Image (spheres, helix red, strand yellow):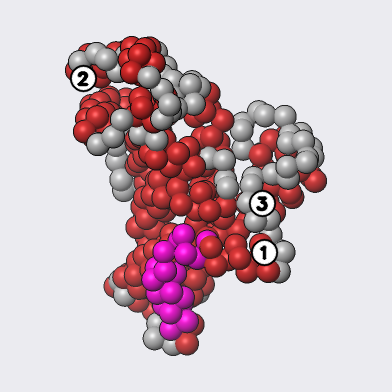
Amino acid sequence: MGAHGNPVDHSTNATMNIYIYVLRRLLLVIPVLLGLSLITFSISRLVPGDPVGLAAGPQSTPEIRERMAAEFGLDRPIPEQYINYMAGVLQLDFGRSLYTKRDVNIELQARIPATLELTLAAIIFASTIGIPLGIVSSLHQNKPPDHVSRLLTLFFVSFPSFWLAMIFQSALGVYWDITPVAGRFPRLALPPQRVTGLLSIDSLLAGDLTAFFSTLHHIALPAFVLSLGALASITRITRASMLEALNNESVRTERSIGIPWALIVMKYVLRNAFTATFTIISLEFGWLMAGAVLVEAIFGWPGLGGYIVDASLNNDFQPIMGVTLVYGVIFSTVNIITDICYGLIDPRIRFG
């Protein structure tokens, strides 16, 4: 046993606090997901339309539609349908698509990595460009670099992503033939062996640089378009946080005692300002996951976006429920990871 105040004891206590905090947050996720599933299930059942009729086809007989409804449990009372569905979810069984008759689990396993890879590429691009742009803007407040930065962010948030997607697709993909028009990988090429489902990572694991650069070639344009809104938000938040930190009394004190300006900015100002920036990055990651639907549809990206669009058009409840719960889990996971990272970035933050 270490003595009182021993650094080993403090490290052990800090680790235990993190474990307890994560456990508490995971327990809080359960009622959130239950509420999300209940709301989504209720809305899906209240939407006008006949999903069984759409799936069976216009030439189907009443007997065929009744048999299909019984096969998928849609002839049961709605409360019983919900209980049966949640019983399957607890066993990681999201049911079958009414329209395609395929297991939702299989579709989710195939499509989640595609959406995740696109979102990661978009948030990396937005952060890599947005953070330096916000820093430069704050250090040159009300000067030409600041004006240019603010003009760009205004432009990025003024146009919807689907409109920009079509413009860039037409210009770079069709007219100039610089980037692929659609898809995640060349149709005639063999993708790398699936390990993570992220083609860029799997290409590197396989040592296939040709596949890696081909993956980057395909993901570059949709990731760029998807990132523009997040890039604008990250730039503005970074700029505002930097300006607030720069106006702090401690910064003036550090300058007066002769600490180099570059060291003040990188070691003190940026560290204090990054908490707000990290918050917006984590939030944008969740929103990009959910907001990638239209971009994926335009670029023919085989992710969750196209899947949920098709399901919505066909009133296909099971895929909609499955995708919604996946988004809920991802949002919750990102929030927990963000809170843990706060404590690593700012030692003043403690896990209670």
User: Is 161 in the magenta?
Assistant: yes
Q: Are marks 3 and 2 in contact (CB under 8 Å)?
A: no
Q: Is residue 69 above or below residue 265?
A: above
Secondary structure at numbered mark 3: helix
CA separation in Å, label 3 and label 2: 44 Å
Secondary structure at numbered mark 1: helix
Q: Nearer the viewer, mark 3 or mark 1?
A: 1
Q: Earlier in the sequence, mark 3 or mark 2?
A: 2
> Can the viewer see residue 278?
no
Q: Earlier in the sequence, mark 3 or mark 1?
A: 1
> Which residue corresponds to mark 1?
174
Front residue of this view, candidates 54 and 16: 54
> Which residue corresponds to mark 2?
78
Residue placed at 61% from the left, 31% from the top? 196
CA separation in Å, label 2 and label 1: 48 Å
Front residue of this view, candidates 158 and 251: 158
Q: Is residue 68 above or below residue 351?
A: above
Q: Are marks 3 and 1 in contact (CB under 8 Å)?
A: no
Q: Is residue 67 above or below residue 343?
A: above
Residue placed at 53% from the left, 40% from the top? 303
Q: Which residues are magenta?
A: 146-165
> Which residue corresponds to mark 3?
218
